[in-house]
Amino acid sequence: MDGLGAVVLAAGRGTRMSSRRPKALHSLLGRPLALWPATLAAEVGARPIVMVIGPDQDDVARTLAEHVGAPDLTFAVQAAPRGTADAVLAAREATRGWDHLLLLNADLPLLRAESLARLVQTYRERCADLLFASCKLSDGGQYGRVLRGADSEVRAIREARDASPEEMRVREVNVGAYLARRSDLFQALSEVRNDNAQGELYLTDIVAWMVARGRKVFASTLDHPGEMQGVNNRVELASAARVLCRRLLEQWMLAGVTFEDPRTTWIEPQVELARDCVVGPGVMLRGATRLATGASVGPGAVLVDTVLGEEARVGANAVLHGALVPAGAQVSPLTVRLESKG
């Protein structure tokens, strides 16, 4: 869609990670957490992509911008933690000149590209002023509730801490992905108030603001509830890694790669595999590793930034880092090889 930019909200401290490292930089399958939604935004054509970070997070900007495979990013700084609406306001200048904005929370790594593409398509087809992703759960927990009127039209999103007992029984919840006309968005954000349980400026309050002014507001329901799983602690980080790893393995198996035991195999998104490769149990394939047609990797091997030529063989429990294995060559079991591909 022409004139579409994206804002990824990554200024959160992530205190539940119990870490000195900002949550945005915690590694998820070899990629910083915040890059997962940023990469999705790039895949659906959003340009520019603005990452909102905290005032003392120069290391976050530097690491994300320099990471291999990262989309083109610009950065905006939220001066103080005043809430999600204030975080988007911090990106006002960086998004000037764009007609529409895609807003994503930085801790939504499980959202699928096809789901986000469908969100963009629905937004365009319905000529919406604001469209956001929702999901129906048997237990909405602490997610914001999507409130609808008697006509089933969206009326508001109520954050869990501010919801009444009746509202808390609503099963439809907010995911944290929005599409909006930029002009309406920033007008709404400038009028959001912090009269709520947390004393913060809620991004979700733009829904009621737009509805009250006759704007066209819709919710688009995700088909797969698991896509809205956020990452707030290391348990959820590990769970997300396993889900993403399983998706990658399924993708490669459908493309003609054999994994003898997918349950014990670890693979990262930069890895490239040709047809008829065979990967044994307990293998780790990391970084920019590439396997040519017919290459095989024995049980327990670890390959990092390694290239295997056609029909190359790597024995069990070998460790290769930055290695180049020629076509038809064999690497003995238990080999440790740390060498440059240059």
Image: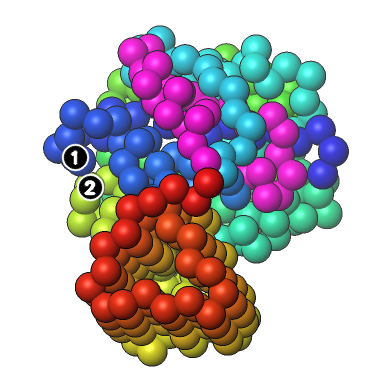
Q: Residue at x 79, y 29 (%)?
A: 99
| Residue situated in front as seen by the camera: 115 or 135 | 115
Within 10 angstroms of label 1, few (less than 14), some, or many (20 or more) residues? few
Per the image, the residue denoted by label 2 is: 233
Q: Residue at x 73, y 17 (%)?
A: 96
Element under disc 2 = loop
Q: Amino acid at mark 1?
A: Arg
In-image side of 17 versus 302 (left or right): left
Q: Residue at x 25, y 31 (%)?
A: 21
Magenta stretch: give its range. 41-68
Element under disc 1 = helix
Q: Amino acid at mark 2?
A: Asn
Whether residue 169 is visible, yes or no, is no
Q: Quadrant of residue 310?
A: bottom right
Up the image or down, 324 lies above or below 291; here it is: above
Whether residue 237 is visible, yes or no, is yes
In-image side of 30 versus 114 (left or right): left
Up the image or down, 120 lies above or below 198; here it is: below
Per the image, the residue denoted by label 1 is: 16
Within 10 angstroms of label 2, few (less than 14), some, or many (20 or more) residues? some
